[in-house]
Image (tube, rainbow, N blue to C red):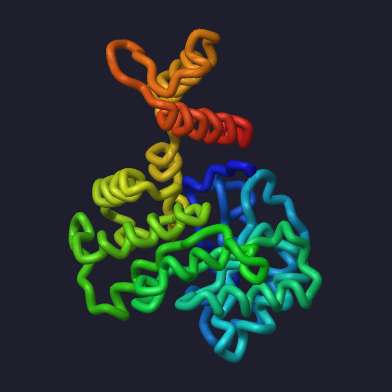
Amino acid sequence: MTIRPRRSVLYMPGSNARALEKAKTLPTDAVILDLEDSVAPDAKETARDQVIAVAKAGGFGPREVVIRVNSLAGPWGLADLEAAAGVAPDAVLIPKVSRPEDVFEASAVLDRMGAPESVKIWAMFETPLAVLNAGAIAAAASVQEGRRLAVFILGTNDLAKETRARFVAGRAPMVAWLTTAVAAGRAYGLDVIDGVYNNLSDAEGFVAECEQGRDLGMDGKTLIHPNQLEGANRIFSPSEAEVATAEKILAAFALPENASKGVISLDGRMVERLHAEMAERTVAIARAIAAAGA
């Protein structure tokens, strides 16, 4: 399976043509061309036309291009998804996924429209039902009807709205939901991307939340402003020391005398095969970041 860095995932409003073009030049791993929350109802169709034209024109380089459509239960979602299928972005982001059937419905539309298998589904994890059904939603990726599912995106603003939880430093009210998403996603091979940080003037708080998401096991963070890119890219990248340690572990297990061992001693500490598997991913993601020129 190809490993892609998803340290920074930047939302760009689909109604802002200048922002859509600017996204092609920013150091973000992925860009979400948004047709949902950032677009007013009377601008929905114009925004769709702009996003489809920009996606079709390309020019995003190594950045993943994701189109967030409106809810399939609403007046714009189906047309959004059908139009997106026609330009074959890297993924479509489906809002308010609360049951596996939501994944199946989106996948069926992509199949019907002839979207190539390379078009993946990213699912917004932003409702109480999504928390309760996390395992079943993630398991959709393991069956034919949901095979396109690849990523969970945490929608922490909507989770707060729907549950009445407060935003506090450390996100104590949400930690159980965040770890549930990570556990469910990892059980079925999905990447998990943290929610946005709303206070653009609080750089210290943003860094702390990125570090928390990283430590909980997330792959990156969704962002609402280019000023947040540097912090997310740095915090969700393996450090030089981590990469060096990983390479040392892999080299040790590659020695002929360690080929059949499940546990070895390295620099005075016990290292198991599972540490070698972790090291392989650390090195792979570091190489993918370097290859992308980030």
- The number of numbered badges drawn on the structure is 0
Residue situated in front as seen by the camera: 180 or 42:
180
Residue 288 position, x and y percent, is 59, 35
Residue situated in front as seen by the camera: 122 or 18:
122
Q: Going by the picture, which residue comes out furthest to the front? A: 260
Residue situated in front as seen by the camera: 51 or 174:
174
Quadrant position of residue 54: bottom right
Q: Is residue 28 left or right of residue 148?
A: left
Q: Is residue 75 left or right of residue 152?
A: right
Residue that appears at 74% across and 60% down? 117
Q: Is residue 243 left or right of residue 27?
A: left
Residue that appears at 55% across and 79% down? 101
User: Looking at the image, can residue 223 be seen?
Assistant: yes
Residue 153 position, x and y percent, is 46, 62
Residue 137 position, x and y percent, is 49, 69
Quadrant holding the C terminus = top right
Quadrant position of residue 176: bottom left
Whether residue 94 is situated above or below residue 217 in the rendered picture:
below
User: Looking at the image, can residue 203 be seen?
Assistant: no
Residue that appears at 69% across and 83% down? 79
Q: Going by the picture, which residue comes out furthest to the bottom? A: 75
Q: Going by the picture, which residue comes out furthest to the right? A: 114
Residue that appears at 63% across and 32% down? 291
Quadrant holding the N terminus = top right
Residue 45 position, x and y percent, is 66, 83
